[in-house]
């Protein structure tokens, strides 16, 4: 165990537990083993997860929570925060476990009158927590799955398998229904590409290379190519579609997160930058090729047994910057052949 806590949560008497989920798709996926750890430690407790839509879809589909509480936009004001706290107070939670690191999460839990409040003592919120866990230097150098899992283990929660096996939580009938809705003429033989990345352009491989890789793999594997992403990724995905020689389908911003997850579950192969949907594909155990440049694969590589990273070992990577201040070599050195070769190698092993 990387972290130690002098104050563990009681093993008995916690009948209702609130977990504050994270705000990003990838982060939410990486918290799932931690939530499984809480569930294993308190199998009979009513477990509720507070998260912002559409992240609620991640927790609704892939966790053993009894209740999902949407952190709606109306709560995104100082007055709204206390309205949310009042609503939570009526639910009479015994404990709150704050996976989100912000001070706001601790303020809400304190204002909601939740007696036990646990989480990292980040963002100056330690004084608001009854079970504050100090982050050590070592915790910043582990995968984000372990970052969250080690926190709940320090609180006395169960030591569970960190592996992801999310495919068992998705109904094949629901997935195929969504596939027919968006691709009525498809035989279900599809490749997914997620060319966007929320954090910034430094995480994005070149659009024309995603297009070329998709074209070649589509021809060689006799598959259709779907472009995925949120509304903010629509323009990037359209650039890929415009560069492609094949008829790629741009669904970025056209589906809900839940629908995108269903469609990804039907993919034969998934190509992506370091993004939230990359984590979804990896956790669903879809063969996933992830292009990494500015970010750190040690901490944010995709989960799953069928993933492969493509990156170049350059001196300035990982820089963790939103925009490259130099020549973007970490991405421009990654060729179409690199990605296509990685994809074929991965499929041959599957």
Image (spheres, helix red, strand yellow):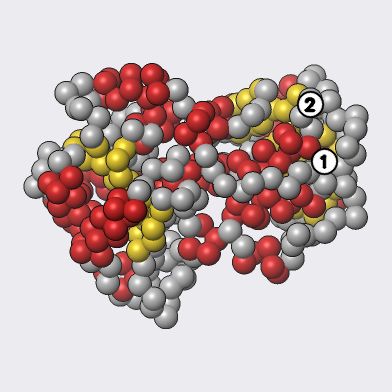
Residue in the foreground of this view, choosing between 279 and 251:
279
* Residue 275 versus residue 168 in the image, above or below: below
Looking at the picture, how far across and down is residue 64, in whole percent? 64, 29
The answer to whether 300 is drawn above or below residue 23 in the figure is: below
Helix, strand, or loop for circle 1? strand
Depth order, front residue of 106/68: 68
Q: Nearer the viewer, residue 231 or 83?
A: 231
Q: Is residue 202 visible?
A: no
182 lies left or right of 323? left
To which residue does mark 2 refer? 45
> Is 38 positioned to the left or the right of 263 in the image?
right
Residue named by callout 1: 117
Q: Is residue 228 left or right of residue 153?
A: left
Secondary structure found at label 2 = loop
Residue situated furthest front in the rendering: 349
Quick one: quadrant of the N terminus?
Answer: bottom right
Q: Nearer the viewer, residue 25 or 322?
A: 25
Mark 1 or 2: the one toward you: 2
Q: Residue at x 23, y 58 (%)?
A: 340
- Identified at 44% across, 22% down, the residue is 171
Residue furthest toward the bottom? 315
């Amino acid at each position: 165990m990387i972290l130690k806590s002098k104050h563990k949560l009681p093993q008995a008497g916690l009948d209702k537990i609130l977990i504050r989920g994270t705000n990003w798709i990838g982060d939410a996926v990486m918290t799932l083993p931690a939530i499984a750890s809480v569930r294993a430690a308190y199998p009979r407790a009513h477990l509720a997860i507070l998260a912002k839509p559409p992240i609620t879809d991640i927790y609704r589909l892939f966790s053993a929570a009894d209740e999902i509480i949407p952190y709606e936009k109306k709560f995104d004001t100082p007055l709204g925060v206390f309205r949310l706290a009042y609503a939570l107070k009526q639910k009479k939670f015994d404990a709150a476990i704050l996976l989100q690191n912000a001070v706001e999460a601790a303020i809400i839990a304190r204002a909601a009158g939740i007696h036990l409040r646990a989480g990292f003592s980040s963002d100056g919120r330690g004084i608001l927590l009854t079970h504050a866990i100090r982050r050590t230097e070592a915790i910043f150098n582990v995968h984000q799955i372990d970052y969250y899992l080690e926190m709940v283990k320090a609180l006395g929660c169960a030591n569970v398998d960190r592996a992801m096996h999310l495919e068992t939580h998705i109904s094949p009938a629901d997935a195929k229904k969504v596939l027919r809705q968006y691709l009525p003429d498809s035989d279900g033989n599809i490749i997914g590409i997620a060319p966007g990345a929320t954090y910034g352009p430094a995480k994005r491989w070149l659009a024309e290379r995603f297009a070329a890789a998709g074209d070649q793999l589509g021809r060689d594997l006799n598959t259709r190519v779907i472009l995925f992403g949120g509304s903010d990724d629509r323009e990037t995905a359209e650039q890929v579609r415009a560069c492609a020689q094949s008829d790629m389908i741009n669904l970025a911003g056209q589906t809900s997160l839940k629908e995108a997850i269903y469609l990804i579950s039907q993919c034969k192969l998934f190509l992506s930058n370091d993004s939230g949907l990359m984590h979804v594909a990896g956790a669903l155990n879809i063969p996933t090729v992830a292009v990494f440049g500015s970010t750190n694969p040690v901490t944010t590589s995709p989960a799953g047994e069928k993933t492969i990273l493509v990156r170049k070992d350059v001196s300035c990577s990982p820089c963790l910057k939103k925009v490259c201040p130099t020549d973007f070599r970490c991405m421009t050195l990654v060729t179409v052949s690199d990605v296509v070769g990685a994809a074929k190698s991965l499929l041959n092993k599957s």
